[in-house]
Image (spheres, rainbow, N blue to C red):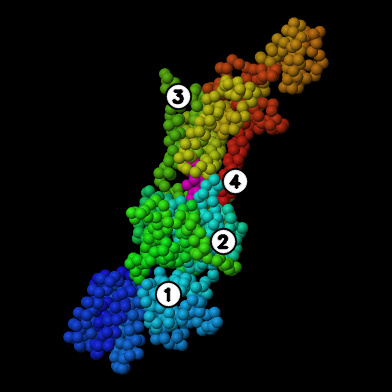
């Protein structure tokens, strides 16, 4: 990595070179000068180098005039103190190594032991001032003095050479068959670099500069050692091989992988490559070259059309459930929960994947992770959205990575980690990913065209060309040379930038897309090599011969909590999200009472003259009940319609954890159920109190709560199903309008187009609506369970049935009997009606059965029917007296004024409707007083407003029966959401 120096700092370095030695003879001065030249030449541009060397000569002349060693010592310490404050740790170690190298070489040529002793004393002052690790210094000193026998830490030593015949026992080896000689390398952790010394006859180049034998050089990140007829040695490859014994070895192999989309040429064409532990691999290419497609295949999100992906020899797609815990994926889009703080985002993420840790341990892990990622100082800040920024883009990206790294995946995929970031933030993110790879992981990123300082951090580079054809795979520093070689170009002056730890990725893309020239020398629109030609060269010259190592994967640190714990975590997270949004809380918990206040205020009708309000005379009660159902539906839909959609990106990230979709869904269900209950309880409390609806509070709340809950479950389904929030909100009116229309309050099902009408039962299409069951439940509840009519339903139903048969059914029979002698065809209808009369009143069955429906028996039948009518009216009178007696016992008029509503009674009994029955297929269908009529259907089908529903031989109160239907609606939507989540790989 390029080191930065202030101008004054660089001058202090030059002066320290002069102060470090005494000038007793010219040999020492020239030696010092050559080391300074080497130090400057490997780090700075030619202009700066020459300026500093000239300055050194001037300063050396000044020192010759002052020969007092004590003065030199004071100046030395002064310069060291200045540099100690201004140099980075790496710069200090590098500077010390240069001085150490000088001392060792001087000791070899100097005859003055006193002078060498003085140099060593000054070197000790340098190490003490810089607070350098003595054990590391000793190790470096042994290495630089070529005294490897004294080097105790042999694990830090590495020998590069041809070991096909001879194997070293004492040191670790890097087998390089085409090198002549050997390179001994010592890894120095404090500067994250190797110190190397070459022994041999081959002319080697380190970063384009000659590497002299038996001299010590620093081999750092981005470095490359090259020679004719020798494949390059890259720092990244050497470091990976050096560390392989210290880590659990990982290997991700793509073997002949191809993924294209039907009917197009898009996707990724056949390619193979291998990436290992501690490697940061970048997939580079322009938009539309298949980078994301390749990512999806490598991470197991998508299956390839052909080929396989292996992790340590295990087929990824065949063992995805087992292996995906070893994988981490950070998509390009933001996966943060914007309402939570930085700390809360990370804590909830940790709780879902580290069940092995206690609450305290999780908090400590989160704080440590925030510290490692440089986010501790913003831990209590709300994350915010990309548009409503609270933290910066770079901080957001680091937090996204931290969310995935908290569970320690072995392989991390990061899609466009630098997208939308400033250059400084992008560099911080890539450095962070490099550190993650250095911990023994594999990190694969997807990137367009990085700047030089990012490019040099990559260990492996895969370049995808148009239509997903691979053009290059290998060390990024060899990409430019490879393309130049294929195009027949030679290196230019720009390639010297490698000496300073830089390279130009833009040049790589330009070479890839190099255009043909016209006769005049201007570029044409055609490339020298198109994507298919580059791919053929890639297959022939670049693509590795893939071999696999079958190693067992270490146990994943990811430990998933059980379903109950997951449910608790999801629920806490959802509550925390909502608690932090004050506008949301205000809308949710103040909206329903405000709506109730507004509705009840407008619907509380008073006497025009006295301005007195009486519940019994409020003509708007049916409207209030209907509006209450609509409000419940609306509240339910609005509450839940964005719940799952808002989490879709988070669900995508958590898919690698194999979490339980039922736990997630149940947390949403419990949340909306509780909020629905609070909303409805407030609505009913306010609305019913204003309209003076006495009693039935819990029944109202239960009906409306189940209505809102069923609507919320519908909202959860559309929230999971649709891909945009706009689509969801556009859908809501299309869901609400049919509910309003088919609830039964606006549309009379008897008075619609005949093709849609059903004279006997509520039409099936209406039964498919939540509102139909909710509204019927509510009006029947108020009509039958109020204190005035409570407990009288059975009596009133019997009274109404007798009234209907006495006043309408039997007169129809009498008409048929009167016409019997003129129209013989009425016999069938007459028999059918008599059977119906026997079915409804078994008491008259025996008398009717004694008389056959014949012409000669008409008079006898007329007499019998007349008796039945009288019997019905007599019983009606008895029932009426019984009902009134019970009502009188409840203080009659007073109770009726407070609990009975005339408009609702007229509405339920259709008091103003002159049609008391209709015919359908020869059947006489009752329309008289539907609120007191129980259908004969044994499967619960009925007309609207029936007080009871029949299931077999059991009668169930309509409002209770409808509650079960509403619960079934909720269950159906629950199952639909669950299946959707499961199918979409929750």
Q: Position of residue 329 (x, y in %)?
A: 50, 57
Q: Is residue 864 left or right of residue 17?
A: right
Q: Earlier in the sequence, mark 4 or mark 3?
A: 3
Residue matched to label 4: 979
Dot 3: what SS?
loop
How many angstroms separate mark 2 from mark 1 (CA)? 31 Å
Reply yes or no: does residue 107 show up in magenta.
Answer: no
Residue 592 position, x and y percent, is: 46, 37
Describe the element under mark 1 as helix, strand or loop: strand
Q: Secondary structure at mark 4?
A: helix
Q: Which residues are drawn in magenta?
A: 638-649
Within 10 Å of the Cα at label 1, are there few (<14), some (14-19), or many (20+) other Cα atoms? Answer: some
Magenta stretch: helix, strand or loop mostly: helix
Give whichever of discs 3 and 1 has the lower sequence position. 1
Please give the name of the residue rendered at 57% of the width and 30% of the height, measured from the top-left corner: 772
- The residue nearer to you, when weighing 920 against 304, is 304
Residue marked by disc 1: 227
Write the residue at 27% across / 74% down. 49
Tell me which corner region of the image, top left, top right, bottom left or bottom right, holds residue 548. bottom right
Q: CA distance from mark 3 to mark 2?
A: 79 Å
**Residue at the top extreme of this rendering:** 822
Residue marked by disc 3: 605
Q: Nearer the viewer, mark 4 or mark 1?
A: 1
Residue positioned 42% across, 47% down in the render: 581
Mark before the other along the chain sequence, 3 or 2: 2
Toward the front, the furthest residue is: 519
Question: Mark 2 = which residue?
Answer: 255
């Amino acid at each position: 990595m390029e080191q930065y120096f202030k101008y004054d700092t660089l001058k202090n370095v030059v002066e320290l070179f002069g102060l470090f030695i005494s000038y007793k003879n010219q040999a020492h001065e020239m030696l010092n000068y050559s080391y300074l030249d080497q130090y400057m030449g490997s780090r700075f541009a030619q202009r700066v180098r020459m300026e500093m060397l000239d300055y050194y000569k001037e300063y050396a002349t000044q020192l010759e005039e002052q020969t007092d060693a004590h003065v030199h010592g004071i100046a030395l310490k002064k310069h060291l103190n200045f540099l100690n404050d201004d140099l980075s740790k790496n710069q200090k170690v590098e500077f010390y190594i240069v001085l150490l190298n000088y001392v060792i070489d001087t000791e070899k040529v100097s005859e003055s032991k006193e002078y060498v002793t003085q140099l060593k004393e000054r070197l000790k002052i340098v190490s003490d001032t810089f607070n350098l690790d003595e054990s590391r210094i000793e190790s470096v000193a042994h290495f630089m003095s070529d005294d490897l026998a004294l080097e105790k830490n042999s694990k830090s030593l590495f020998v590069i050479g041809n070991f096909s015949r001879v194997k070293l026992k004492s040191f670790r080896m890097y087998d390089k068959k085409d090198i002549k000689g050997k390179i001994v390398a010592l890894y120095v952790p404090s500067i994250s670099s190797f110190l190397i010394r070459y022994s041999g006859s081959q002319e080697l180049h380190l970063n384009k500069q000659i590497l002299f034998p038996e001299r010590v050089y620093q081999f750092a990140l981005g470095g490359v050692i090259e020679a004719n007829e020798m494949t390059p040695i890259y720092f990244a490859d050497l470091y990976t091989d050096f560390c392989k014994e210290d880590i659990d070895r990982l290997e991700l192999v793509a073997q002949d992988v191809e993924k294209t989309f039907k009917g197009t040429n898009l996707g990724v064409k056949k390619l193979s490559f291998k990436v290992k532990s501690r490697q940061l691999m970048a997939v580079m290419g322009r938009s539309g070259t298949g980078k994301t497609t390749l990512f999806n295949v490598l991470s197991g999100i998508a299956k390839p059309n052909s080929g396989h992906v292996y992790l340590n020899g295990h087929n990824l797609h065949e063992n995805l459930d087992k292996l995906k815990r070893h994988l981490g994926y950070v998509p390009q889009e933001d996966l943060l929960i914007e309402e939570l703080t930085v700390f809360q985002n990370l804590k909830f993420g940790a709780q879902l994947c580290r069940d092995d840790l206690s609450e305290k341990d999780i908090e400590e892990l989160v704080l440590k992770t925030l510290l490692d990622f440089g986010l501790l100082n913003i831990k209590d800040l709300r994350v915010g959205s990309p548009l409503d920024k609270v933290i910066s883009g770079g901080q957001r990206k680091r937090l996204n990575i931290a969310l995935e790294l908290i569970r320690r995946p072995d392989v991390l995929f990061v899609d466009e980690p630098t997208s939308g970031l400033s250059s400084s933030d992008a560099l911080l993110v890539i450095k962070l990913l490099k550190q993650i790879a250095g911990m023994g992981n594999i990190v694969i990123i997807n990137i367009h065209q990085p700047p030089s300082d990012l490019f040099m951090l990559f260990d492996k580079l895969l370049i995808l060309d148009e239509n997903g054809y691979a053009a290059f795979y290998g060390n990024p520093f060899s990409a430019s040379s490879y393309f130049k070689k294929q195009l027949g170009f030679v290196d230019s002056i720009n390639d010297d930038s490698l000496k300073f730890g830089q390279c130009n990725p833009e040049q790589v893309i330009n070479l890839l897309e190099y255009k043909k020239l016209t006769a005049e020398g201007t570029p044409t629109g055609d490339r020298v090599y198109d994507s298919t030609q580059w791919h053929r060269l890639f297959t022939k010259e670049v693509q590795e011969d893939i071999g696999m190592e079958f190693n067992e994967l270490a146990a994943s640190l990811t430990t998933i909590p059980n379903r109950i714990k997951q449910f608790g975590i999801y629920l806490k997270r959802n509550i925390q999200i909502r608690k932090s949004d004050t506008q949301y809380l205000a809308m949710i918990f103040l909206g329903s009472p405000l709506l109730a206040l507004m509705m009840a205020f407008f619907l509380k009708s008073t006497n025009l003259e006295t301005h007195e309000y009486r519940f019994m005379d409020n003509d708007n009660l049916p409207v209030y009940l209907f509006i209450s159902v609509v409000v419940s539906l609306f509240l339910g839909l609005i509450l839940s319609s964005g719940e799952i959609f808002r989490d879709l990106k988070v669900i995508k990230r958590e898919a690698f954890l194999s979490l339980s979709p039922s736990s997630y869904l149940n947390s949403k269900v419990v949340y909306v159920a509780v909020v629905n209950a609070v909303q409805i309880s407030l609505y009913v409390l306010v609305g019913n109190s204003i309209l003076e609806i006495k009693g039935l509070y819990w029944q109202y709340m239960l009906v409306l709560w189940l209505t809102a809950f069923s609507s919320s479950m519908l909202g959860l389904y559309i929230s999971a199903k649709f891909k945009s929030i706009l689509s969801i909100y556009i859908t809501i009116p299309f869901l609400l309008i049919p509910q309003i229309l088919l609830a039964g309050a606006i549309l009379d099902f008897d008075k619609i187009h005949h093709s849609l009408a059903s004279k006997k039962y509520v039409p099936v299409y209406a039964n498919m609506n939540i509102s139909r069951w909710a509204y019927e439940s509510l009006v029947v509840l108020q009509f039958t369970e109020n204190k005035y009519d409570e407990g009288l339903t059975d009596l009133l139903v019997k009274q109404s049935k007798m009234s209907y048969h006495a006043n309408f059914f039997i007169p129809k029979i009498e008409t048929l009997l009167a016409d019997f002698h003129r129209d013989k065809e009425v016999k069938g209808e007459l028999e059918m009606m008599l059977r119906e009369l026997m079915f409804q009143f078994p008491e008259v069955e025996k008398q009717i059965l004694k008389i056959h429906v014949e012409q000669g028996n008409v008079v006898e039948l007329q007499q019998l029917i007349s008796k039945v009518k009288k019997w019905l009216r007599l019983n009606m009178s008895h029932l009426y007296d019984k009902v009134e007696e019970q009502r009188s016992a409840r203080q009659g008029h007073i109770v009726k004024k407070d609990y009975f509503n005339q408009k609702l009674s007229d509405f339920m009994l259709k008091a103003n409707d002159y049609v008391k029955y209709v015919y359908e297929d020869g059947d006489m269908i009752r329309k008289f007083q539907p609120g007191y009529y129980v259908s004969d259907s044994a499967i619960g089908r009925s007309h609207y407003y029936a007080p009871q529903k029949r299931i077999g031989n059991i009668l169930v109160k309509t409002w209770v029966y409808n509650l079960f239907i509403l619960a079934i609606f909720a269950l159906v939507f629950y199952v639909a959401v669950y299946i959707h989540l499961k199918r979409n790989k929750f």
